[in-house]
Amino acid sequence: MIEQQDLKLGALLKLKRYEMPTEAFWTAFDADLRTKLDLTPIQKKCSWFSQWVGILYRFSPLTVACTVMVLLGLSFSSNNRERYNVISQPVSLNECRSSVLKSTSNALAKSVIQKKMVASAAPNCFSF
Amino acid sequence: MDDSDQRQEIGQTSNEEDLRWLSKFKEGNRRAFDFFVRKYQRRLFGIIYNMTGNKEDTADLLQDVFVKAFKAMGSFKGDSQVYTWLYRIATNTTLTFLQKRKARRALSLENFSPDDEAVPEFLLKDPKGEKGDKQTLLKELQEKLNEALQKLSITHRTVIVLFEIEGMNHAEIGKILGCSEGTVRSRLHYAKEQLKQLLKDYLEK
C-alpha cells in the first residue's frame, strides 16, 4: 500500500515537468538576457600575486598591523642573535683581568690581580 | 527506459560537449555561452519555478543565475561537471532568495498540458470510479501540487524537486546541495511523507 502510494506520488510529481512557459516567454527572456550579458564583464582568472594584493587591499588595517608585528618580531630576533653571537665568543681570564687593571686605581687590587695573572700559567678560558 | 536509467542519463548529459563549449568561452568567445543558455534554460527554469512556485520570480532568478554563471565561467576550474556547477548556482541563488523572501502568493504557469501517456490512469477517475473531465482535473491537480510543494520547508522542497521532478540521483543532489547522500535520503523521506498527507485525496483514488 505504502509502495503503491510512493509510485502514485512519483507519477503525480512527474507531471510537473510539463509545466513550462510559452514560446513567447522564451523569446522575451532570451532578448533580455542577451542585453544583460552584453553589459556584463567576465571575471578573469587572477595570478597568485594579484590575488594576494587583492586580499591585502581588502583587509588593509588588519594586514598592516599583522605585517608590522611580524617585521618587529623578525628584527628583534635577529638583533638578539647578533648579540648572543658576540657574547658567546670565548674570553680569556687574563684578558678580563688586564681590562680590570686598566680601569681600577686601587693599588692593593692591582697587586692582587697582577699576582693572579702571573700565577695562572695555563690559559683558562670560560664563556658566559 | 525505467526510472533509474533515466536518472543515470541525466547525470551523464554530454559533459564532453559542455567542456568543448567551455573552452571556446575561455578562449574569449562570449557567444559560446549561448550554448549553455539554450541547453539548460528550460531545466533550470523548472527547478527554480518548482522551488519558488511563482513564475515572475522564476524569470528574474533565472536571469540572475545566467549572469552569475557568465561572470564566473572564466574561472570555472572544471572540478565538477558543468551542469552540476550550473545547478548549484541555480539552487543556491533560489535558496538565498527564498530565505529572504516573505510569504508570497503562488503564481502558477498557464501552460500545463502533459502528454496523454504521462497522465496516470488513477488520476482521471472520480471518487465513483468514473472518468472525469481531463482538463479540469489537470488544472485542479496543478494548483494542488503547487500548494503542497509550497507547504514543505525550503530544504525538503529542494530535494523533492531535484529527485522527483528533475530526475537526479542522490549523489548528484548531494553534490549540488553540498550535503551527504544520507542527508538527501532522509530529507527525501520526510518530504514524501508530508506530500502523501497533503495529496492523500489523489493518492487514495
Image (cartoon, helix red, strand yellow):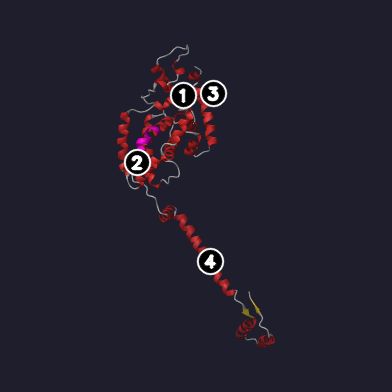
Mark in the foreground, 1 or 4: 1
Estimate the spatial distance between the alpha carbons at disc 1 and disc 3, rounded to whole Å.
12 Å
Whether pointer 1 and pointer 4 mark residues with C-beta atoms closer than 8 Å, the reply is no
SS state under label 4 = helix
Estimate the spatial distance between the alpha carbons at disc 3 and disc 2, rounded to whole Å.
43 Å
- Callout 3 amino acid: Glu
Categorize mark 2 by other alpha carbons within 10 Å: few (<14), some (14-19), many (20+): some
- Callout 2 amino acid: Phe
- Taking the spot 65% from the left edge, 79% from the top edge, the residue there is A125
Estimate the spatial distance between the alpha carbons at disc 1 and disc 2, rounded to whole Å.
34 Å
Q: Considering only order in the chain, which callout, 3 or 1, is on the residue closer to the N terminus?
A: 3
Q: Quadrant of residue B79?
A: top left
SS state under label 3 = helix
**Residue B159: x, y in percent?**
48, 32
- Callout 4 amino acid: Phe
- Callout 1 amino acid: Ala
In this rendered view, identify the residue nearer to me: B33 or B52: B33
Q: Quadrant of residue A109?
A: bottom right
Q: Considering only order in the chain, which callout, 4 or 1, is on the residue closer to the N terminus?
A: 1
- Residue of label 4: A76
- Residue of label 2: B33
Q: Which mark is residue B89?
A: none
Estimate the spatial distance between the alpha carbons at disc 3 and disc 4, rounded to whole Å.
74 Å
Q: Which residues are magenta?
A: B33-43
Whether pointer 1 and pointer 3 mark residues with C-beta atoms closer than 8 Å, the reply is no
- Residue of label 1: A11
SS state under label 1 = helix
**Residue A67: x, y in percent?**
48, 59
**Residue A75: x, y in percent?**
51, 66
Left or right, residue B131 beside residue A113: left
Left or right, residue A85 beside residue B87: right
